[in-house]
Amino acid sequence: MHMPPRPVRILTLILGVIVTLTALAGVGISWVGVGDDAGVVAADPVGSLPSPDVGETGESAPGTQRQRLWLLMGYEGVLLLTGVLTTLAGTGRFSSGFGMACATLGGTVVGAAVLGWVDAQANLTPATSPFFSRLVTPTMLVRVVCGFAIAGCGGVAVLARRPQEWRRFALGVVLTAPVLIALGAIVLGKTDSLLAPREGTAETLRIAGMFIGGVLAIVLLSAGGHLLITAFERCRDESEA
């Protein structure tokens, strides 16, 4: 059995504690809830319905019933459980399957963080919760970074079994990174001016460029993905030999 390197386990432990603490805070906020206007915001995000009575500070007026955020509490509960399991992984509880455990836990953190952020955006607004509404997006970003870092710790632990596979892994990252960066730029709208339709010869060149770029992206993803998978497969074979 290969024990993960001590620095990797310590980092995993720290990341697990961070996720656990933020999830505890999230469960508490979800339980306390917000004023009745939270239901209006969730049901009427464009603000077409009249708002309930809210004080000048944005807090619900005295006597206003508060609504618990059950859906958000569910996501926070998943994050809490995941954080505890990640902390246990950092203490060496899952040494025999550390890589797979971290990959699963990291993916769960990212998924629950994003879904919880969507729900929190609709309910923890400046009108219903002036203070916590400012923390929604920063908290989500911290959790997403922690999730990817936890998964990364699992990858490092696996590659540490057979250090010569780092070169193969690095080459796979180099090949796939440009495609992922380009996709991110497209999703964020940074390439709208380049992809916008044109006229005449410029349009022909644009279509040809998109075709060539698409083929190149497929080739890079295929080659890079193959190298990444092979690197981890070889490490697994080494550990089972």
Image (cartoon, grey):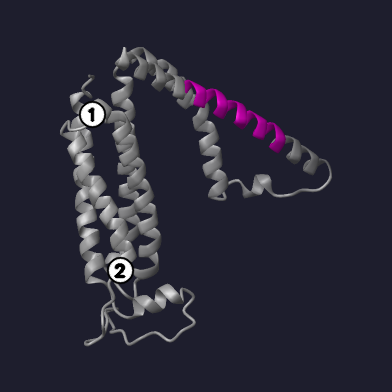
The residue positioned farthest toward the right in the image shown: 200
Residue 196 at what x, y percent from top left?
69, 49
Q: Dot 2: within a 10 Å radius of its alpha carbon, few (fewer than 14), some, or many (20 or more) residues?
A: many
* Residue that badge 1 annotates: 8
Q: For residue 77: magenta?
A: no
Q: Residue at x 63, y 49 (%)?
A: 192
Nearest the camera: 241 or 209? Answer: 241
Nearest the camera: 53 or 154? Answer: 154
Q: Is 191 above or below relative to 93? A: below
Q: Residue at x 29, y 37 (%)?
A: 150
Amino acid at dot 1: Val
* Real-space CA distance between mark 1 and mark 2, rounded to the nearest whole angstrom: 36 Å
**Residue 231 location, quadrant:** top left
Task: Look at the image and tell me whether residue 135 can be seen.
Answer: no
Residue 176 at what x, y percent from top left?
51, 29
Magenta stretch, residue numbers: 210-227
